[in-house]
């Protein structure tokens, strides 16, 4: 078991990041080009890996596995491997990185490129931003491919550090506050999880952290519930699930748009990924025990966050709240314990990463033109910048899960999967779709429709670089909207494995033909 | 815990295992040599000669410790009529590990003390006895003269620290306590800048330290009354056989603990720590924060694990309480601090609490965890104090937090180093601090699960003030009269580099040191 494929994948961004850090501040241009080339190379690499991933019915759950002893005394291994869930999330993460890099190309070069004027700040080093992005990419890949709980925890916590610097060094006026809040919230969750990680190690007595060895070893009862809660709270803060969400609007609003896209698009997925990879298989009884409460929290999250999003004036906060609502759907899909729900939730994670990433990027592009995050400062921009308006609308429509967009497929699967087990909750959650239409279209209407405001008159439309940043993401969303099969083929077996860990089988299909058609 | 018999029962003259005591003798010899150097070497050369003598002594002692690695010997107690010949000094795995750690940290502290490129002379006063502000004082301050006695004082303190964690005899432990404390009281008052503050710190430390010692001595007397012996082994055995009142035992232990916890700066016996660390010359504070703590926890380990391992159920609640108090005080009060050195002081109080968490679980794993933790903590703290020396304005070190704003602009290297050290103290993965915390909590989980959760939550609180410094350094704009960042000279550059490298390497590859700590788990009682 010494497949180096994933180790090489992790090494590329790490080495590139160190290289870019060591460049001189004046070599910003080289830094950007190197980073972008590396990020694109990684995309190609992961696409090749995905193509070689075995989706045959009896293929092994984890593939490309490699395991090396790291800390012998604690039984810790540097163990990596991907199942379908991890693979598609890695794919989503690495696709988002070059898009963010392109969108942030000039953000830190000059005052005019910056999103917001911050009085008295010196120019920030573009080189450091790109190096941090690559470092973050290393941690993001690591957190998804780790198959050792200790290793996962290390990446889970270490990932905070580059994001903290991205928010704190490159963010908006209240960036210090936002960076601190982000870090402390995540750290509290992380430390509770550490308690559970240690508890897991001690109570199972297996002297190992390998996830495959730990599954089924945790004794049922109070211990399992406590350990579950440690993991769950950490992931719920990360995801974020209402009521652990209050850091996200601040962090999302103050981070630079590119950072916010990665933060909400990828980092938060680690929370929902953690539910599937760790909470469910390791603590099946506790998961079942807490599932009703989590489902209700998810539905509350969908509605509550949607209402808050409707009321926001700050565009980045608005997008952040839409994400909280979407995480409600993902939570619903995961804890419904059905194959459709689970598959839908994983697909939702991928789609939401792409769609929110795109939305944050276009909002960032708009803000960079108007130097204000407030909706009130805009109006009628569609007449001046039709291309930006088009991209904005498409990204927005994907956020409200319009049929034809990939997000529709996943939202539909989640709702169907939930309905088969909890029809009441599914019905309530469905109203979230209507609310989504309100906040997206209302935002679009206030910024791009109506009279052209004076601030907007001089806007220039998207240039080629900016189109290249957003275009592929939108194209991918539409493509997957019509043809999600390649992803579903990869995801489905992994979800089945996960549900078999929880000893759950799908209820008798009431909506069989529809679901079958989608699969 | 293994117990080996060093001497047979028939010999009447104690056979001292001189080789096992060699590190202590070497350091004491170097200290005495330092006193002679003070008397015969001309003033001009004195600083460099003293520096070399100190460094050579410490390194030679460290080499001896390495050579002794694996020995388990005890040298007999002076009480000749005791047929068992209980050892008064047990040079065992734990003792050697701690001695090695103390010596390495002392070498780095010596390098910081010897740093002369920041200030005229060094950060040590020219003449500690001169009245502050007098014409003579002002004249001397401008010269490069330094009170070079600090080097032999440091060596004497180290010799006490070497005996402290290997003493199996409470009277000897008390002597070691005094030998390590008295030079520290003096050293605390030897700051070149802000001399009054330094002298205040010295007096405060002395008075409170004297109280601590008195408590220790009183406890010792009561325990003697109980067990009719001051050897830890006999005290342990007396708990099964003695007909004396248990009040003597428990009161004795309580008073003994006060003395030890005072030295380890554990709340509620911590109140001296922030003031003394702030007032002392920074290299001395670095020395106190790292070495003294290592020695004090070594002694605590020995007293509790040898002398009182039979009455765990009685002292465990006390350690629980002080551990919680220490973690909470360190975390909460640290938040309100505005001075970097005070922040580090409260951080050291919080860390003392974490070490106690491991101490509560009496097991092999907990001993190894304590050993590993004090090592990681010592290096990170020493390097952090060393960095404080670099940030200076016209009045010397600029320790107010507001002066650290925007430091990353001036010196990214210093800011990044400080960040790594602070992240280590906060216990973020890929630093030694995380591995230490993991080790401690894993050892304590079974016996003290709730304590582990409290520890984790308080480390989340403490993370706030570590991060606040990072926020200031990186995300804030520099103030008008921003301090300058000195380029470290060779000596302190070495100390800082070693501290940083240990912190990073142990965070990524802790295995060798974990093994060393695991293999070192043996306490020789007699």
Image (cartoon, rainbow, N blue to C red):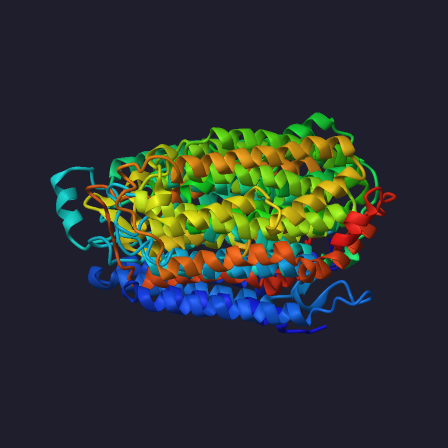
Q: Which residue: 53% across, 63% down?
A: B22
Up the image or down, B472 lies above or below B49; here it is above
Q: Quadrant of residue B399?
A: top left
Q: Nearer the viewer, residue A16 or A303?
A: A303
Q: Quadrant of residue A108?
A: bottom left
Whole-percent x, y for residue A94 in the image: 54, 61
Q: Nearer the viewer, residue A154 or A495?
A: A495
Side (left or right) of B159 relative to A237? left
Q: Nearer the viewer, residue B237 or B296?
A: B296
Q: Is residue A146 visible?
A: no
Whole-percent x, y for residue B422 in the image: 45, 48
Q: Which residue: 74% across, 26% down?
A: B245
Side (left or right) of A41 relative to B279? right
Up the image or down, A401 lies above or below A13; here it is above
Q: Which residue: 58% across, 43% down?
A: A238
Q: Is residue A96 visible?
A: yes
Mark count = 0
Q: Quadrant of residue B457?
A: top right
Side (left or right) of B503 relative to B129? right
Whole-percent x, y for residue A246 in the image: 52, 33
Q: Which residue: 34% across, 44% down?
A: A383
Whole-percent x, y for residue A272 in the image: 64, 46
Q: Nearer the viewer, residue A330 or B294?
A: A330
């Amino acid at each position: 078991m010494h497949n180096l494929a994933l180790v090489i994948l992790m090494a590329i961004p790490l080495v590139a990041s160190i290289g870019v850090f060591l460049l001189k501040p004046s070599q910003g241009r080289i830094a950007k080009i190197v980073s972008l080339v590396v990020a694109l190379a990684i995309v190609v690499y992961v696409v090749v890996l995905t193509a070689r991933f075995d989706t045959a019915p009896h293929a092994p759950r984890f593939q490309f596995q490699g395991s090396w002893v790291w800390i012998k005394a604690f039984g810790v291994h540097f163990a990596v491997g991907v199942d379908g869930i991890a693979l598609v999330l890695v794919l989503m993460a690495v696709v988002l990185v070059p898009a963010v890099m392109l969108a942030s190309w000039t953000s830190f070069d000059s005052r005019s490129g910056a999103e917001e004027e911050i009085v008295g700040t010196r120019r920030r080093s573009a080189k450091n931003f790109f190096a941090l992005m690559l470092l973050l990419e290393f941690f993001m890949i690591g957190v998804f491919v780790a198959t050792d709980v200790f290793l996962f925890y290390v990446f889970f916590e270490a990932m905070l550090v580059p994001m903290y610097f991205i928010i704190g060094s490159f963010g908006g006026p209240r960036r210090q506050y936002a960076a601190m809040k982000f870090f402390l919230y995540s750290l509290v969750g992380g430390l509770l999880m550490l308690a559970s990680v240690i508890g897991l190690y001690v109570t199972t007595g297996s002297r190992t952290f390998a996830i495959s060895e730990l599954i089924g070893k945790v004794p049922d009862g109070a211990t399992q519930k406590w350990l579950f809660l440690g993991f769950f709270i950490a992931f719920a803060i990360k995801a974020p699930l209402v009521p652990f969400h209050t850091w996200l609007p601040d962090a999302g609003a103050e981070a630079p748009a590119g950072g916010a896209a990665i933060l909400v698009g990828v980092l938060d997925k680690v929370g929902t990924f953690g539910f599937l990879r760790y909470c469910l298989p390791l603590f099946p009884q506790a998961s079942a025990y807490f599932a009703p409460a989590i489902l209700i929290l998810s539905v509350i999250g969908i509605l509550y966050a949607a209402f808050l999003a409707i009321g926001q004036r700050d565009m980045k906060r608005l997008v952040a709240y839409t994400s909280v609502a979407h995480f409600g759907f993902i939570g619903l899909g995961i804890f419904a314990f059905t194959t459709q729900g689970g598959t839908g939730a994983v697909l939702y994670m991928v789609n939401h990463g792409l769609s929110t990433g795109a939305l944050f990027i276009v909002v960032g592009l708009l803000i960079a033109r108007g130097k204000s995050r407030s909706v009130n400062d805009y109006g009628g921009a569609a007449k001046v910048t039709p291309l930006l308006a088009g991209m904005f609308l498409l990204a927005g429509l994907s956020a409200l899960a319009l049929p034809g967009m990939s997000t529709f497929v996943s939202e539909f699967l989640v709702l169907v999967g939930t309905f088969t087990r909890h029809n009441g909750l599914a019905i309530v959650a469905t109203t979230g779709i209507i609310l989504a239409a309100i906040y997206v279209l209302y935002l679009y209407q206030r910024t791009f429709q109506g009279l052209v405001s004076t601030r907007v008159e001089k806007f220039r439309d998207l240039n080629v670089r900016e189109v290249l940043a957003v275009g592929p993401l939108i194209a991918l969303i539409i493509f997957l909207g019509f043809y999600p099969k390649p992803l579903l083929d990869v995801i489905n077996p992994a979800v089945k494995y996960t549900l078999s860990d929880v000893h759950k089988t799908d209820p008798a299909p009431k909506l069989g033909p529809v679901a079958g058609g989608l699969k | 815990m293994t117990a080996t018999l060093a001497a047979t029962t028939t010999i009447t003259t104690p056979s001292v295992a001189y080789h096992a005591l060699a590190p202590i003798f070497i350091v004491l010899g170097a200290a005495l040599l330092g006193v002679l150097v003070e008397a015969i070497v001309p003033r001009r050369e004195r600083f460099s000669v003293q520096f070399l003598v100190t460094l050579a002594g410490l390194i030679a002692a460290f080499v001896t410790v390495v050579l002794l690695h694996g020995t388990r010997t005890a040298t007999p107690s002076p009480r000749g009529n005791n047929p068992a010949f209980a050892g008064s000094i047990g040079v065992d795995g734990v003792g050697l590990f701690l001695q090695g750690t103390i010596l390495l940290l002392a070498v780095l502290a010596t390098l910081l003390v010897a740093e002369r490129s920041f200030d005229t002379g060094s950060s040590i006063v020219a003449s500690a006895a001169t009245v502050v502000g007098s014409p003579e004082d002002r004249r001397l301050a401008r010269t490069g003269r330094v009170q070079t006695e600090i080097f032999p004082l440091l060596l004497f303190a180290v010799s006490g620290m070497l005996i402290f964690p290997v003493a199996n005899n409470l009277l000897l432990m008390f002597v070691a306590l005094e030998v390590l404390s008295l030079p520290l009281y003096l050293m605390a008052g030897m700051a070149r800048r802000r001399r009054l503050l330094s002298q205040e710190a010295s007096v405060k430390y002395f008075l409170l330290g004297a109280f601590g010692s008195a408590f220790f001595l009183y406890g010792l007397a009561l325990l003697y009354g109980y067990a009719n012996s001051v050897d830890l082994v006999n005290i342990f055995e007396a708990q099964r056989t003695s007909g004396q009142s248990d009040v003597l035992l428990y009161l004795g232990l309580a008073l003994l603990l006060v003395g030890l916890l005072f030295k380890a700066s554990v709340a509620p016996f911590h109140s001296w720590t922030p003031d003394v660390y702030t007032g002392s010359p920074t290299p001395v504070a670095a020395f106190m924060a790292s070495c003294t703590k290592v020695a004090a926890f070594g002694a605590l380990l020995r007293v509790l694990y040898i002398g009182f391992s039979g009455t765990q159920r009685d002292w465990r609640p006390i350690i629980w309480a002080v551990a919680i108090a220490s973690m909470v005080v360190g975390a909460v009060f640290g938040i309100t601090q505005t001075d970097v050195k005070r922040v580090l002081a409260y951080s050291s109080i919080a860390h003392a609490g974490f070490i106690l968490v491991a101490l509560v679980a009496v097991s092999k794993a907990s001993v190894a965890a304590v050993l590993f933790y004090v090592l990681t903590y010592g290096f990170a703290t020493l390097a952090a104090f060393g960095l404080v020396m670099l940030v200076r304005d016209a009045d010397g070190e600029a320790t107010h937090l507001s002066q650290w704003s925007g430091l990353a602009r001036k010196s990214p290297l210093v800011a990044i180093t400080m960040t790594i050290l602070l992240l280590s103290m906060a216990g973020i993965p890929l630093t030694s601090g995380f591995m230490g915390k993991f080790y401690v909590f894993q050892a304590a989980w079974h016996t003290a699960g709730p304590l582990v959760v409290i520890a984790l939550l308080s480390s989340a609180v403490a993370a706030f003030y570590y991060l606040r410094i990072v926020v200031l350094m990186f995300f804030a704009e520099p103030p008008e009269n921003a301090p300058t960042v000195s380029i470290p000279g060779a000596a302190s550059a070495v100390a800082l580099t070693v501290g940083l490298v240990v912190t990073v390497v142990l965070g990524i590859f802790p295995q060798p040191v974990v093994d060393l700590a695991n293999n070192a788990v043996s306490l020789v009682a007699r």
